[in-house]
Image (cartoon, helix red, strand yellow):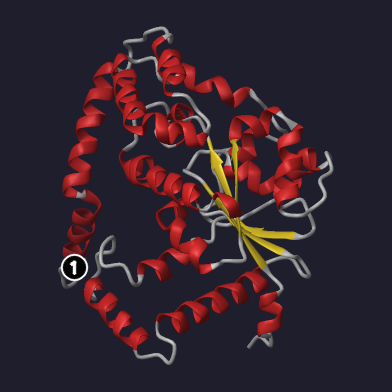
Amino acid sequence: MSNLTNDVAADITPVFLLSLPRSGSTLTQRVLATHPQIGTAAEPWLLLPFIYARRRHGVYSVYRHKLAARGIDDFCAALPHGEQDYVSELRRFVLRLYSLRGKKGARYFLDKTPRYHFIAEEIIQLFPGGRFIFLWRNPLAIIASVIETWGHGRWLLHPLIDDLYDGVDRLVRAYDAHRDKAYAVKYEDLVGSTEQWKQLFAYLGLEFTESYLSDFSEVSLGGALADPTGRKLYQSISTEPLQKWKRVLTSPVRKYWCRRYLRWLGNERLGLMGYDLDTLLSELASLPLSYRTIPSDIWRMLFSMAYRIFEPAIVRDKILKLLRRERLYSHF
């Protein structure tokens, strides 16, 4: 049993690195973690179930999550100070865990969980004294990185459609509403300028030394959800990834999908992120055409649509239960 007191938890200031997946967040995390005042862990995912506990949508379970959310709300309403008591206790609980997991005596704990974009607004509300870093990356580079990392060159976006649409919209809205307490930076600027790192550390009130940009290669985050590629491929800051997307998005089918996506993002969202719609469309249009992946791309895009409608992963789990002669349950 830990003897950690509330005072120890109060000494920790959480830092949240908010971004889409494949945005360079692991590189940023490792550089920041070289500082002795910043503790971290690979990808905690700690806050998602606690925030979603009171959401009516987004969770399907055998215990009927919507009813659970109603029950928790009823419970909170009867607390001496209502919802505020629940929020205060949740904040204290999470800070205590950050204290236990972070570096001894460190001022900050950095939580880098890409899917925190779903709860970015709630995180900022939950930790009014926290630090919030919004990391943007060229959306075309994100798409290409997903294809290369998880699709091994094949079109594979269906597991990240929510990230690319709902996720980026939530991030943009959260940053727009809290610019006064947040810090935004583009991945392209981080890998291209030491000055951007200085400003990022200054936002945290910490001194920056250029040795951090090489020492980060010694930072081992461990954990089951650590980035599968970044640590292996890049042991130093490199601008090489900035142009890789141009070799991946040359199929007419991919270019068509990306054009539609960029236009959905629009000038307002892209402008807040630091990008220009017309420039990105022009760069995409200038890529040489390659027809090699067209059949695969069309098939996988159709599969993506079916996957989101029928969710075969759930069906697969039910079939496995039947084969094990286990009882099946409905999910609500």
For the image, the number of numbered tags is 1
Above or below for 261 versus 68: above
Q: Is residue 275 above or below residue 117?
A: above
Q: Position of residue 309 (x, y in %)?
A: 17, 46
Residue appearing at x 72%, y 33% in the figure: 236
When asked about the image quadrant of residue 185, the answer is top right
Q: Quadrant of the C terminus?
A: bottom left
Q: Is residue 232 above or below residue 105?
A: above
Let me know if residue 291 appears in the view. yes
- Horizontal placement of 68 versus 286: left or right? left
Q: Say which quadrant the N terminus sits in.
A: bottom right
For this view, does 214 lie left or right of residue 2? Answer: right
Pick the front one: 305 or 185: 185
Identity, as a three-letter code, of the amino acid under mark 1: Phe
Q: Nearer the viewer, residue 223 or 288?
A: 288
Residue pictured at 30% horizontal, 14% vertical: 252
Query: Relative to 168, is 13 on the left or the right?
Result: right
Where residue 81 appears, as percent x and y from the top left, is: 44, 87
Left or right? Give the position of 35 relative to 263.
right
Q: Residue at x 24, y 37 (%)?
A: 304
| Residue drawn at 41 percent across, 43 percent down | 168
* Rendered location of residue 84, percent (x, y): 45, 80
Quadrant of residue 77 within the rendered picture: bottom left
* Residue 219 in view (yes/no): no
In the picture of the structure, the residue carrying the numbered disc 1 is 332
Q: Counting other residues with Cα less than 10 Å from the Cα at mark 1, is it few (<14), some (14-19), or many (20 or more)? A: few
| Image coords of residue 289 (percent x, y) | 37, 8
Helix or strand or loop: what does disc 1 sit on? loop
